[in-house]
Amino acid sequence: MSETPLIADLGTKEEAPLSGARIGVVTFPGTLDDRDAARAVRLAGGTPVALWHADETLGDVDAVVLPGGFSYGDYLRAGAIARFAPLMSKIVDAAKSDAKLPVLGICNGFQILTESHLLPGSMVKNDHLKFICRDQVLRVENAETAWTNQFEAGQEITVVLKNQDGQYVADEKTLDELEGEGRVAFRYVGWNPNGSRRGIAGITNAAGNVVGLMPHPEHAVEPGFAPLDGDTGAYSTDGLGFFTSVLNQLVGGAK
Amino acid sequence: MTTQSARKFNIDTVEHAGQTPETDLPWAELGLKENEFEEIVKLLGRRPTAAELAMYSVMWSEHCSYKSSKVHLRQFGEKLTEEMKKDMMVGIGENAGVTDLGDGWAVTFKVESHNHPSFVEPYQGAATGIGGIVRDIISMGARPVAVMDPLRFGAIDHPDTARLVHGIVHGIGGYGNSLGLPNIGGEVVFDSVYQANPLVNALAVGVLRHEDLRLANASGVGNKVVLFGARTGGDGIGGASVLASESFDDTKPSKRPAVQVGDPFAEKVLIECCLELFKASLVEGIQDLGAAGISCATSELASNGEGGMQVELTSVLLRDPTLTPGEILMSESQERMMAIVRPENVEAFEKVMEKWAVEHSWLGEVTDTGRLIITWDGETIVDVDPRTVAHEGPVYHRPYHRPEWLDGVQADTFRSSAAGASLPSSGEELKAAVLTLMASPNMCDKSWVTRQYDNYVGGNTALSAPDDAGVIRVDEETGLGVGISTDANGRYAYLDPYTGAQLALAESYRNVATSGAVPMAVTDCLNFGSPEDPEVMWQFAEAVRGLADACQTLGIPVTGGNVSLYNQTGTTAIHPTPVVGVLGKFDDVARRTPSGWRKDADGQAIYLLGTTRDELDGSEFANLRGHLGGLPPKLDLEAEKTLGAILVNASRDGMVDAAHDLSEGGLAAALSEMALRFGVGARVSLDELCERDGVDVFTALFSESQGRAVVAVPRSEEVRFNDMATARNYPVIRLGVVDVLATSLDVQGQFELPLETLREAHEATLPKYFG
Amino acid sequence: MPRIVVDVMPKPEILDPQGKAIVGALPRLGFTAFSGVRQGKRFELTVEGPVTDEVLEQARNAATTMLSNPVIEDVVNVEVLAEDAEDTAAAGAAAAGAEA
Amino acid sequence: MPRIVVDVMPKPEILDPQGKAIVGALPRLGFTAFSGVRQGKRFELTVEGPVTDEVLEQARNAATTMLSNPVIEDVVNVEVLAEDAEDTAAAGAAAAGAEA
Ligand SMILES: Nc1ncnc2c1ncn2[C@@H]1O[C@H](COP(=O)(O)OP(=O)(O)O)[C@@H](O)[C@H]1O
Ligand SMILES: [Mg+2]
């Protein structure tokens, strides 16, 4: 059988060739996973650009990541106060403009996107009322968006889930619309870890440039610091696909 | 904003104190002893003002002054060798110790207790425990990078335990998760001795570049003193609020919250804001505000620096405008820091505050008068030598003696007791015993707890629960990193506190080495009963002596820690519980060793390092049968060093793919945990081991002999691995092989335990009690 | 079905991080009229039958023992919801609540 | 100083996990009178001066734009706190609040 040291692949820090695309990563007071998101962008071959919530302009970034954390402590509602940051109105405008700025909201970033009404629905407390941190398998339901075009529809990927308010809710009409338009981007596979309606882990807007999800792809990008794939027992770097997808899209690459 | 100078107080000034020597002061209510009060009068040459009394009373409390423990803790310094000092950049005495990692990197870590507040209000008590230790780390100039939480609860089925478990775990997660600090390890132990005295110890670790190191001193005459972060409220002053009398005014509200509420968002902002200050070199000295609040920060900064400081107290921003000066000095409001800033940096400092929307107020400046002068609206209410407040408090040589009951306890060995009769011996009995052990409250799976903690945030966690040590990458370029473990066994320390403390250190050391890190430094949190009980004091003295001696033998220094006394209800003290944290270094965390074998490890050889003796006294097995007596396992520190070196070398040279130390629950626990880690089975035989060490199968499985570890060795490395152990004269024996197809732990000739059965038993316990 | 409202607020002397975060954000949205905000909890308890004294007493007890943490919170109000009050008489043995 | 209360409740059609947990726990403590529980939020906004119509309007706006999320919550009440009402007249330009 295999004689290779189990952890050997950690040493190889191959980074993808730089594409030159500039991906903004926004920091709000209370943001936690901003450095992690920047690392993921870099490992995927993009150039991370730090953005500050109070900035008045977006600069010349080609896409934006709203990372995880507890902006303003999530004290009022997750993402509720961050939504009013000066930079958010710029992001909302750019996302809705003809240029269709690609925006990815991860965890707290997803919550900010729903609070901003860029994406429908909202998140409430996990049904078991506890914070949960686990390795999570997702099914990619829509592989056509700016952030998922490097996956295959139906593909199962392993990333990290960690949150307190991760239960996705929306009224039945909205849910039916999301399903009908193929806008459910990711679904939990197996046990539903937070009671989300219809097992929804992430959604996209109609144009496919704005994607939000509760799990954390930026924590599944580097062997040794990543979740384990349940089948193979190896480290999962499935999260890289999110960032290579947007880089691919930015250079005009088709699926 | 309220200007407090407008407020009507009948202020007790220094001048007034001089004129009214006969005034009755509530020193006893503030916890001072008569001799201590007399000492204060002697130091000042007059009666203290109300504000001075407030300062001395909090700073001379057991918690802040270490008055009962100081004479013993000295040994940690006295027993330092040159070798131990080599990498120690900052030792005991500062907010946290600092260890050099090379390449210009350094690491700081410390463990502290928040036991009593967590019993009163579990969520907030535990949350603010994390908050407090993290501020200690920030104040060294470091970025906090991880936390750990050694916990002790009462009996798992006691009605109050669920309240404490839920609140405390939720509080630790609620605060730590919100700070973006991965939780990389801890302990969960249940024992009825902790019923009304749960232990909530919190450890934080931070990293810094050498040039960012900051100390808590106020140097540079004319430099400014600034208080920043949250506003000051009545937190932690206590319901008594005897200082209401300070204003000789009974119209003010006397209700002061004894409970502090944490604001993790404020602390997260404080972290980022401090790091920006350090990076731009905008602060000269910095001190966190914890116990004793402004009293502590001003007196420590002043006495560590030029020796003088002048502060105007009405400049402090308040959350509760009715606070008296004494209360402001005592308040333990969270999420505050005090810093010393050069005048030319004031503007830049304010820019950083503005960026992060952190409130701040300039309180005064550093002087060379040797006096700490605090004014209230210009009138002097404190005029003291800061050293007498901060460092020259009372020191007690409390009487101690060996408890008379100890001989009886030590004579009551497990084998000789009724509990030790009819031990499992058939394969079926042994199998049942392993299942019972692995489902027991102390040995069961802890993921009900650890799943509530973020262990991924930061992207640098290389190992966390359930591995032997938490491992954090420090430098992304080189992979430089650290591994940390915390351990304590209160039952061992009860049977013999000297050895018990050493065993805690040895286990922690072994855990760190098992993960592949070279042990470098120690932090400790000494949780004991009342120092006024000579028998408890003896336990304390013995534990400190044991720990200091063992550190010397192992060659690693204690760089910081904390003492928590009075953990007792009535005359019943908790087991002495010296929690020991060991920190080790990795040149490259890519080489860290997980505590179980993976799916691609089929056919790897399983070896046991070390010797198994008949050592069941104080063991988890004895605990299952409700027995506690005899002597704890023997400890050979030289053997532990050798074992550590073998494990570190094996990891560095890629000779082992998995390793797990043996501690509570012995070999039975180690093999079960290794198989469950990634759900991969194994076939082992204990025959050769039993023959070599002269023990029966039961003893081989459940003895808690020290100096042992199980490793999985790839076939290609077996020769090298054996040679290395033999060259060092360390006992090593091949137990069997990893078997990916086997879905069980097969102890040949004895029993075959399906992993599913084992997992179910192991994982069901905490959910059963806590939902 | 009648509902009983229980209002719980953080004790005045206790730090309220929630309220603090909100009060900091309000002016940025142009809401400048407020100098302080405190955030508490409001519970609505649905009662099956009529709200007897015994039921109200249960609500008061639940408020202090379970719905609030007396160490850091005060129960500031326990009352029958006015808008339900007229139903109350008619309520009788209505069907079970939606949430049970 | 006068305070304005804003009450926010989860929409009836949105499952309220906290309310559900409470309704499950109540009977275990002997509180059997309640068939449903919903947990919402209560905000108390402190006003510096008198509560003018303009101030109340600000409170209503803050309630719908920031203090609640219309997708999942309803603002069920915005009113001046009764117990403060008598102070209100007298309040005038009192000193600043503690929480700012
Ligand atoms: N309260 C806790 N917080 C975080 N991790 C914990 C906690 N309790 C236990 N763990 C982790 O669970 C694992 C098993 O704990 P324990 O049996 O005490 O380890 P060991 O015997 O190796 O010291 C370790 O990885 C430990 O760090
Ligand atoms: Mg271990």
Image: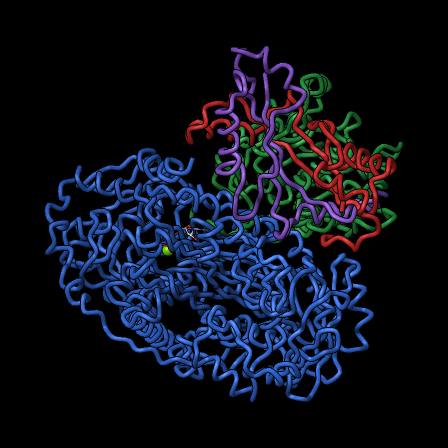
Chain colours: A green, B blue, C purple, D red
Q: Locate the N terminus of chain B and report the quarter of the image it occupies.
A: bottom right
Q: Nearer the viewer, residue B10 or B612?
A: B10
Q: Is residue B199 rendered to the left or right of residue A180?
A: left
Q: Position of residue B371 (x, y in %)?
A: 64, 85
* Quadrant hosting residue B505: bottom left
Q: Position of residue B723 (x, y in %)?
A: 31, 64
* Quadrant hosting residue B499: bottom left
Q: Nearer the viewer, residue A218 or B327?
A: B327
Residue B659 against residue C82 in the figure, above or below: below
- Residue B519 visible in the picture: no
Which residue is located at x 51 percent, y 88 percent?
Answer: B42
Which residue is located at x 71 percent, y 84 percent?
Answer: B220
* Quadrant hosting residue B568: bottom left
Residue B527 against residue B40 in the figure, above or below: above
Residue B526 against residue B21 in the figure, above or below: above
Q: Position of residue A218 (x, y in %)?
A: 64, 44
